[in-house]
Amino acid sequence: MARKKYSIDWENDEPISFEVDGVTYNALDDVPNEKDREKLSAMLDASFDDAFDDSFEDMQFDEKEFEELQKSSAGMEKILLGIFSGVAVLMLLIAGISSYFAIQKISKEESAPGRIADVVVRKEYINEQDRITRDFYYPVIEFTASDGKKRTVQISEGSDSPYYEKGDEITVLYDPEHPLDARIQSAGSNALMWILPAITGILGIAFTGAVLVVKKLMPPAEE
């Protein structure tokens, strides 16, 4: 006795007809023979199982891609952490060194009465591209150092306003070993000495905070 031939026609992953020995049925329930229905039902189940396996393999592939993405993200976070840590150390180091030199300078300075001998006016660019200039005022001071010699020094820090006039009495702070290293005693000159330590210190603290945040957000390392 010849074996029966069974087939299922599919469209868009859905069965649309069933065939038994050349006879086509639109639905499984339309097949009159129970054994034929069981055979076609088994074929249908097997087809659905194959489709599920293919989908599961795709899902596993996606999970592998996700794991690779996680590893890549963790690598970028480590690089970022290293950069931030390096910048934080550098900024704090500069802040510490510049603070040390500022303290050393202040501790060696001596004071002496002096006066403004002149005020030098210079035009300086504040926007080179548009060639915009502004007048800056540089005081020239006179004072007698502890060695008894009179010194005349032009202050290196200028201002865009004439804070001093010729003949003004001032107090001069200077290094007795290098009397030409002098400045006018004022809140402004004191603040200038701490600009670099302050800026680098703030940046160092900010980058240190960023390092701590990145470490907190990083997933724990897998053992």
Image: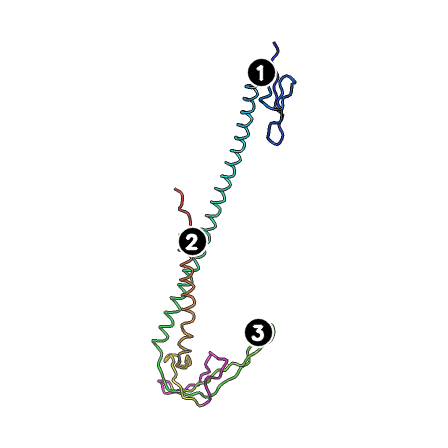
Q: Quadrant of residue 81?
A: bottom left
How busy is the neighbourhood of tag 1: few (under 14 within 10 Å), some, or many (20 plus)? Answer: few
Please name whichever residue, 2 or 165, is drawn nearer the observer in this view of the structure: 2
Please name whichever residue, 31 or 133, is drawn nearer the observer in this view of the structure: 31
Task: Point out residue 85 in the picture as x, y percentages from the top left corner.
Answer: 42, 57
Task: Point out residue 180 in the picture as x, y percentages from the top left corner.
Answer: 42, 81
Say whether residue 127 is left or right of residue 219: right
Q: Are marks 3 and 2 in contact (CB under 8 Å)?
A: no
SS for dot 1: loop
Name the kind of residue labelled 3 in the image: Asn
Is 194 colored magenta in this rendering?
A: no
Range drawn in magenta: 145-166
Badge nearest the viewer, 3 or 2: 2
The answer to whether residue 22 is above or below residue 197 is above
Say whether residue 145 is left or right of residue 129: left
Number of the label disc, if any, that sits on residue 162: none
Name the kind of residue labelled 2 in the image: Val
Question: Sequence-wise, which precedes: disc 1 or disc 2?
Answer: 1
Give the residue number, with chain letter if any, for mark 2: 214
Task: Point out residue 133 in the picture as x, y percentages from the top left corner.
Answer: 57, 78
SS for dot 3: strand
SS for dot 2: helix
Please name whichever residue, 72 or 115, is drawn nearer the observer in this view of the structure: 72
Q: Are marks 1 and 3 in contact (CB under 8 Å)?
A: no
How far apart marks 3 and 2 lie (CA) works out to 39 Å
Give the residue number, with chain letter if any, for mark 1: 33
Give the residue number, with chain letter if any, for mark 3: 127
